[in-house]
Structures are given as C-alpha cells and as structure tokens.
Image: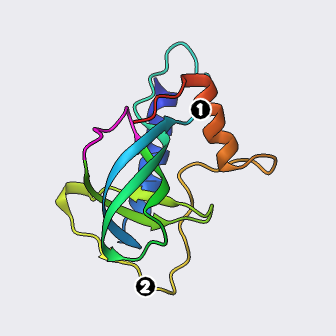
Amino acid sequence: MIAAVVFGLVASSAASAEQACFDAKVQARPVDQIPSEIGDCGSDCLIMSWPWFVDLRVKRVVDGALSSKMVSVLTVQHTYRVSHEGTWFLRKNKAGSYNVLVPEDGSALTRCSAELAPAEPYIRPNSEHTLDDLRNDGIRHYGHHPG
C-alpha cells in the first residue's frame, strides 16, 4: 500500500509543481488513451493513478499555439477519461510532447512566458528507450482500444 501512495504522491507533486502555467489551452477530444506499463509493486500495493499517453484531436486553440490538429500528451490518471470534447491545458515538456495540467481546487492557470523552459515529462524513459517505446510497452501489456 505504501508503494502506491508514494507513486501517487510523486506524480501528483510533479504535476502540482508544473501547474503554475500552460502553453496552450485547447478544445479537444481524446481519440486514443494508452496507460503506461506499471511494474510489479507487490501484493499489498494499490496504484491509484499513473502516467498515460493520450492523443487529442484539437478542435480549437483557445489560448497559445499548436502546430497540429492532432497532439500526443502525457496525463496522470486512474482510468480512461470520457471521450467527449473538453478543455485541456497543455504544458510543453522536455520530451517534445505536452503534459496535461489539471487546475487544483478550481484555481485558474495562467499562460507561460515564452522564456520559460519546458517541464519534466510525467514519465521519463531511460537512456536506451524513447517515449514511443514506453507507449508501445503499454499497448503490448494492456492491449489497444483506440477511441
């Protein structure tokens, strides 16, 4: 049980630390959602949330800029999100993708300055792998059910 709580707190802390600002606010619909593979944490462990790979079909950029109508993002979630269109706050990350930010307690997020360095991604591959490798590991482990 402690292992699950620790992972959840690390992911939540990373997400909270990066929630100060967003790079793009978009109206989008998730079209693919793939959980990252979770290692074995023991028989008394319960994972509440972990990094997922989500592909968004962007209908409209509300604030900021995106170069594509399809964007791959990283989220921290418990299960599949509902697949209807909604507002997504995106923060550039050092892996060349985006982290999804979820405002805590209804707080408002502000737009990042252009000089601000990208955030750490919610999941980081080791030096021998890429985010695509981790995404493919998730597909192999959990199956693939695109929206």
Please tell me whether residue 47 is drawn above or below residue 97 in the rendered image: above
Q: Which mark is residue 129?
A: none
At horizontal 36% and vertical 34% (from top left) the residue drawn is 80
Q: Which residue is mark 2?
A: 113
Which is in the foreground here, disc 1 or disc 2? 1
- Sequence-wise, the earlier of marks 1 and 2 is 2
Q: Which residue is mark 1?
A: 138
The C terminus, quarter of image = top left
Give the residue at the far right of this rendering: 128
Residue 67 locus on image (x, y percent): 49, 72
In the drawing, does residue 93 fall left or right of residue 30? right
Residue 37 locus on image (x, y percent): 59, 31
At horizontal 55% and vertical 61% (from top left) the residue drawn is 97
Residue 16 locus on image (x, y percent): 39, 58
At horizontal 58% and vertical 48% (from top left) the residue drawn is 123
Q: Which of these two is toward me, 133 or 2? A: 133
At horizontal 40% and vertical 79% (from top left) the residue drawn is 112
Give yes or no for residue 70 being in the magenta stretch: no
